[in-house]
Amino acid sequence: MMNLLRKSQNDSVDDEQLINIYELLFDRYPDPIYIMDHVGHILASNKAAMTFFDRKIKNIQHFISNCIPQPYISDTLEHFSKAADGEYQQYRSAHILRNGKLIETNVHFQPLFNRNEPFGVVLLISDITELEAQKAILSKLEMSVNTVEELVDLGTWDYDIVHNKALWSDQMYALFDLDMDETPTYEKVYERIHPDDRENFETQYQKAIEEKCIFSISYRIIKKDGTQRVVNQYADVLLDENRRPVRMIGTSHDITEQVHIQTKMKEQEQHVKKIYDNLDAGIWSMDVLENKILFTSKGIENISGYTSREFEEGTIIWSDLIASDDLPYYQSRQEILADSKPPKGRYRIIHKEGHIRWVEDNTIPVFNHEGTLIRLDGIITDITEQIKSEEAMAHLAYYDYLTALPNRRMFEDELVTLIESSSTLKKQFAVLYIDMDGFKRINDTLGHQKGDLLLKEISSRLRQHTPERDLVARMGGDEFTILLRRIQDTEEAVSFARKLIQSLEEPFFINGYELFVTASIGMTLYPIDGEDPETLMGRADTALYRAKEMGKNNFQIYTSSMNIESFKVFQLEKDLRKAIKKDELLLHYQPKVDGKTGRLVGASPDQMGASRMGTDITS
């Protein structure tokens, strides 16, 4: 945009407007940017750098030691060294954020030149773990537009259709491998296009001319060295007073890496590709004093369904699109703008076609010298698919895939939360640890498929006979847990356990089979049997073990004597293992004597063994 402004004869662009553009491109850009000299001293950085890393970075070595994980340090140093020597570097890496989180990143080291001699390096870090629409922002720094375009592999151009000549930015020459002294023409571009894509390019180009419509296309080009790049091209057709097409103004964007990433993600998970395909962003600007929209990009229309003209003419207002439940939150953000920049916000809007879309709003207030708010600039990103994906991942993390019950992780989190609240409110609750008797026999006899169906039926019956406020979870295999969140006394928990055992004694019907299983239950009470998760669960397991010993199909409440018995068994087993290892076992024989005659009639049949142990059975 700055390139076109400077190369045009638009005298209305003054310094203040250029400064405003600089703020939007560099200081307000959401990704971290560092400008360094050729030995790695940090000369400048934008606000996002501090937001991401929260450190005052002095040089490249300081940055690496604080923000780069150990496996990536050597690669980072190597890439910086090459960039300092004038070689552009782009690669995948990882960085450590201020909160300790590790993110995957796409890194650019862009050398800066003065008369063909490298004198500095620009470092740009893009977070590619979050599927944001930051790729839609075309400029990042107040530096030569060519350098900015190289960072994002985007070129701008103005094509004279009548005279078949074009005005290109420097990045366009680099992208299409043309010398700077060559005049760009349609034919020279056509020569670079992959043979398989030429027919479609020609068709779309002619359609744009004939129908006077937008020219938007992606195609492959072949560079002089034989490498292929994928280019996304977008242009508007300008008409003369007789409505004849005379010019095209547009952009050409190298999207090769994006295409490669999307292809790889498609092979792994289709839903991730859908996120890439549907991510969109819009840029807008508003004159606060005039209460008028100055500009909205095409992305706003893609997100909301309403055109730029409708916003700019005031026939539609953004706040009118916001879902009623989210409107108070949006209005609270607007109040902050008069004094400072609010953090990014998420809320829902109603699309023109009536469906709900989630958006992320990054609004930037602009103040004059007196500190008065005069303009708002912003970026709106469609994150609907991302929200859906986050909800799906959260469900997988906290729910059992087979039974749809909460899993061990969710149960443990709920138990911790319940302990905290019950401690404050002086309430008691119960933990039930359940193991199904006879399930293994059925699983081994009828197979895992019917075993899984039986587990689903068991889960359904547990949920059916448990109050809605309480939690039923599957811990794994045929083990389940129940949190009775509020009980008045022990008898209430005992009554529930009895009814639960009775309900599970009823037969289960699976694919024509009438199956019977029972349940053994171990129970602990908070705070009587423990005041932390480990103690409560450990003692519930001890009580369950006792229920198994008592013949199964019953429940046992934990008592301290259970630990004593468990300790005795544990100690005996430990002592036996040591005795066997040290050969400390001694075999004694009990003689057999005839009660009438007093005659010794026998002992052990192992005569040699008795002799080795030093026992004489003849005396």
Image (cartoon, rainbow, N blue to C red):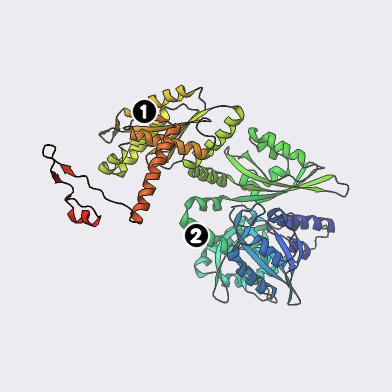
Q: Which residue matches tag 1?
A: 501
Q: Is residue 509 above or below residue 163?
A: above
Visible residue check, residue 156: no
Estimate how packed mark 1 is, as few (under 14), some (14 to 19) or many (20 or more) residues with alpha carbons within 10 Å. Answer: some
Q: Residue at x 25, y 55 (%)?
A: 613
> In this orientation, which residue lies closer to the viewer: 335 or 129?
129
Find the distance from the CA under tag 2 to the CA under tag 1.
51 Å
The quarter of the image holding the N terminus is: bottom right
Q: Position of residue 195 (x, y in %)?
A: 51, 70
Of the residues tagged 2 and 1, which is closer to the observer? Answer: 1
Visible residue check, residue 438: yes
> In this orientation, which residue lies closer to the viewer: 453 or 521?
521
Disc 1 marks which amino acid?
A: Ile
Estimate how packed mark 2 is, as few (under 14), some (14 to 19) or many (20 or more) residues with alpha carbons within 10 Å. Answer: few
> In this orientation, which residue lies closer to the viewer: 518 or 146?
518
**Labels 2 and 1 touching (C-beta < 8 A):** no
Disc 2 marks which amino acid?
A: Lys
Instruction: Find numbered disc 1 in the image and state the secondary structure of the residue it sits on.
Output: helix
Q: Residue at x 27, y 44 (%)?
A: 444
Q: Which residue matches tag 2?
A: 264
Instruction: Find numbered disc 2 in the image and state the secondary structure of the residue it sits on.
Output: helix
Q: Position of residue 105 (x, y in %)?
A: 61, 60
